[in-house]
């Protein structure tokens, strides 16, 4: 029971804190991005080493460490996307009135490099974990990848609350690929599939036949999946969730205050030029 409570609390804390940190760093002025990515890359290297080092550890602490490493690898991918380092060859909004296959192709072009980076990240984690008794990091990344692909498709097909406020200013063109509608046909399948997967993991735990390591691992992964299900439901419910990460969103104000002096200086120059 202690392993269950510890695993749930640990997963919730990392999910909340990690999201807030990424939002804060990606909302800062662009001049800070190189330092943010440098720090994220150092953590990425440490995480990859951690995945290898914990591969043979079948303890509760081993599950927690491997889970953390998987989240750190995912965090690097998120940072690279939200800073604009790895997005796609298309850096502009979809043309007005574009629809159908062309609209889908434009959407893929906007995130192509990021998608390839996610596939590469998953391949590396699976490769270095192959055959190891502790594969929590790889499973963590794969679950996040599956949930994120589902969320992206739901945003593309249309949801009521796409969360456009989370996009940093330099990625606002991605809003042109979001569609506003109460729900789409994919949504019920996304939520049902994730719910079944979480239920299987929880069922394994409640059966009482798992080792402490296996219990911690399944609870970590189940908690992560449930959080993904909640995030899916928030896409269709008229609820503003930015308060959950209020301190992470404050950097948007920092960027606005930084940009304001530059704008005020540019205006006189423009008038003089005329």
Image (cartoon, rainbow, N blue to C red):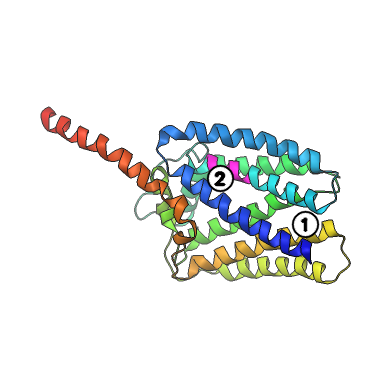
Taking the spot 82% from the left edge, 43% from the top edge, the residue there is 55
Residue 8 % position (x, y): 69, 62
Q: How many marks?
A: 2
Question: Which tag, 1 or 2, sits closer to the chain's start?
Answer: 2
- Circle 1 sits on which residue? 217
Would you call the spot at circle 1 few (<14 residues within 10 Å), some (14-19), or many (20 or more)? many
Residue 182 % position (x, y): 45, 71
Q: Residue furthest top?
A: 273
Label 1 SS:
helix
Question: Would residue 247 be counted in the magenta stretch?
Answer: no
- Circle 2 sits on which residue? 78
Residue 252 % position (x, y): 38, 47
User: Does 257 sit left or right of 197 as displayed?
Assistant: left
Above or below for 60 versus 232: above
Would you call the spot at circle 2 few (<14 residues within 10 Å), some (14-19), or many (20 or more)? some
User: Does 26 sit left or right of 120 as displayed?
Assistant: left
Q: Which mark is residue 53?
A: none
Q: Quadrant of the C terminus?
A: top left
Above or below for 207 versus 44: below
Q: Quadrant of the N terminus?
A: bottom right
Q: Residue furthest front?
A: 2
Question: Would residue 77 be counted in the magenta stretch?
Answer: yes
Viewer-proximal residue, 223 or 155?
A: 223
Residue 204 % position (x, y): 81, 67
Label 2 SS:
helix
Taking the spot 71% from the left edge, 66% from the top edge, the residue there is 198
The residues colored magenta run 74-80
Q: CA distance from mark 1 to mark 2?
A: 23 Å
């Amino acid at each position: 029971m202690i392993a269950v409570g510890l695993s749930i609390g640990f997963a919730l804390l990392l999910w909340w804190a990690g999201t807030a940190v990424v939002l804060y760093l990606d909302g800062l002025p662009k001049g800070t991005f190189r330092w943010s990515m440098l720090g994220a890359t150092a953590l990425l290297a440490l995480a990859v080493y951690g995945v290898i080092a914990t591969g043979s550890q079948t303890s509760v602490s081993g599950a927690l460490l491997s889970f953390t490493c998987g989240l750190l690898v995912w965090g690097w991918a998120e940072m690279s996307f939200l800073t604009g380092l790895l997005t796609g060859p298309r850096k502009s909004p979809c043309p007005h009135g574009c629809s159908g296959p062309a609209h889908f192709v434009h959407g893929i072009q906007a995130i192509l490099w990021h998608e390839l980076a996610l596939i590469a990240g998953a391949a590396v984690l699976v490769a270095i974990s192959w055959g190891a008794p502790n594969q929590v990091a790889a499973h963590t990344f794969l679950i996040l990848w599956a949930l994120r692909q589902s969320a992206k498709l739901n945003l593309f097909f249309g949801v009521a609350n796409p969360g456009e406020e989370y996009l940093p200013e330099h990625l606002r063109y991605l809003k042109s690929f979001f569609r506003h509608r109460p729900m789409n046909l994919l949504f019920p399948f996304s939520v049902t599939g994730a719910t079944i997967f979480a239920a299987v993991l929880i069922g394994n735990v409640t059966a009482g036949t798992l080792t402490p390591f296996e219990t911690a691992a399944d609870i970590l992964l189940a908690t992560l999946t449930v959080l993904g299900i909640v995030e899916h439901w928030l896409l269709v419910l008229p609820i503003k969730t930015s308060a959950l990460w209020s301190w992470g969103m404050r950097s948007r104000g920092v960027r606005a205050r930084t940009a304001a002096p530059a704008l005020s200086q540019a205006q006189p120059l423009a008038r003089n030029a005329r």
